[in-house]
Image: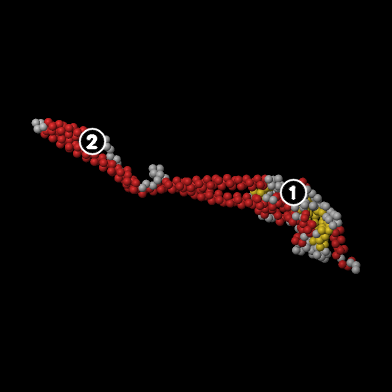
Amino acid sequence: MKINKLEIENVKRVKAVRIEPTKNGLTVIGGKNAQGKTSVLDAIAWALGGNKFRPSEAVNTDSVIPPHMKIIMDNGLVVERKGKNSDLKVTDPSGQKGGQQLLDEFVEELALNLPKFMEASGKEKANTLLQIIGIGPQLAELEQKEKQIYQERLFVGRTADQKEKFAAEQPYYPDAPDEPVSAADLIRMQQDILARNGENQRKRNLASQLEIQADQAEKELSLAYARAAEAEKQLEAAKEKYNKACEDRDIAFRSAESLIDESTAELEDSINHIDALNLKVRANLDKAKAEDDAKVYRDQYMQLSQSLEQVRNEKMSLLENADLPLPDLSILDGELIYHGQKWDNMSGAEQMIVSTSIVRRLNPKCGFVLLDKLEAMDLDTLQEFGKWLEQEGLQAIATRVSTGDECSIIIEDGYVAGAAREQQDQQKNLTDWSKWKA
């Protein structure tokens, strides 16, 4: 629904104003400061929005007549507030009466106060849009999940960095064994070698003894030959004994010559330096553990990165499939994005377009918005916004400190310029008590 006609008398700075706004597009109410431009918008908001929009100083100070507001909507609905108590009368085209509840069905509160939306924080704007398109709870859940995964990934990433740095700072000894060395094991190995070396020495001693025995046998043989006459039997026995001794001796010498004593020097050195060696081993183990820990956290970081990417993709999919008021409008990190720009980087026209579109989506029955103080817009921006309103079939009634051609009407001292004299005379007749009759 849109406004066809409006009549306002004695509201704030307005004395008597009648306006027929453009049905589709921008109606600019121009004039100098303190002439009644904003009072027109306040009166419309009060008439349609109810007493919560009533100005604190609602009555024109130059008049004793109570405020009177009459608005005719494009479907024939008539809204009128008048009298000392500003009583509301709403009549639909069929002649049936209604009240504020009927107005609330097609009047969006933010349409009466669009700056309230425009001045809200980026998060509040985004939340308003999300509630409109019905994905606020789902997106909030995804954002909470995204935040949780991001914080967890941040912690894991920092921990992985610390572990990797710690591992890199640890000394490494490539010549050290993989496990700490036990002194008892080294001593046992040393004792085993010493035992084997002792056995070798025993065999050497045995060979020497056998050599002595062979020498003794040789002497006895010589004696036996000298005593050959004594007995052949003794000679043969001596020969056998001699031969056996020689054979044992040769075997013993050959066996002794092949024996090689093992050195315990390395083990003794290891025993003497076991603490230093084990320090190196432990350092290598600490470095390996630090590298393993870093790898575990790095793997967790990668997994969390994948989860984070998945959640963000779900958010993007949710927004891409949402029924947004504008084709290039979206939400990123809790901020409105239009044509790839955040709110503070949008042009004035783009901000107006986004705000009007969102307010329109809040209540599709409401076909108009009120805009105050458009003097911040240059003429090109104003024209661009007006064309967009026409394309969308929307009505905007706005004020601007200007008396230029871009203004639809000019307000001067509470009247529409050009009609001011006639309205002043009418007002004077109404307020000149000397002409009243009983």
Image vertical order of residue 221 relative to residue 13, above or below: above
Q: Measured from the top left, where is residue 221 in percent x and y? A: 13, 33
**Numbered label attached to residue 385:** 1
Q: How is the image coloured?
A: secondary structure
**Numbered label attached to residue 262:** none
Mark 2 and mark 1: Cα distance apart in space: 119 Å
Residue closest to the eye, 113 or 207: 207
Residue 418 visible, this orientation = no
State the residue at coordinates (15%, 36%): 216
Quick one: label 2, few (<14), some, or many (20+) residues within 10 Å?
some
Residue type for callout 2: Ala
State the residue at coordinates (17%, 34%): 241
159 with respect to 326 (left or right)? left
The local secondary structure at tag 1 comes to helix
Residue closest to the eye, 228 or 109: 228
Q: Residue furthest right?
A: 437
Q: Measured from the top left, where is residue 192 in percent x and y? A: 30, 43
State the residue at coordinates (27%, 35%): 258
Image vertical order of residue 290 relative to residue 223, above or below: below
277 with respect to 97 (left or right)? left
Residue type for callout 1: Phe
Q: Measured from the top left, where is residue 175 in percent x and y? A: 38, 42
Q: Measured from the top left, where is residue 73 in percent x and y? A: 82, 54
Residue 423 visible, this orientation = yes
**Numbered label attached to residue 252:** 2
Which image quarter: residue 107? bottom right
149 with respect to 162 (left or right)? right
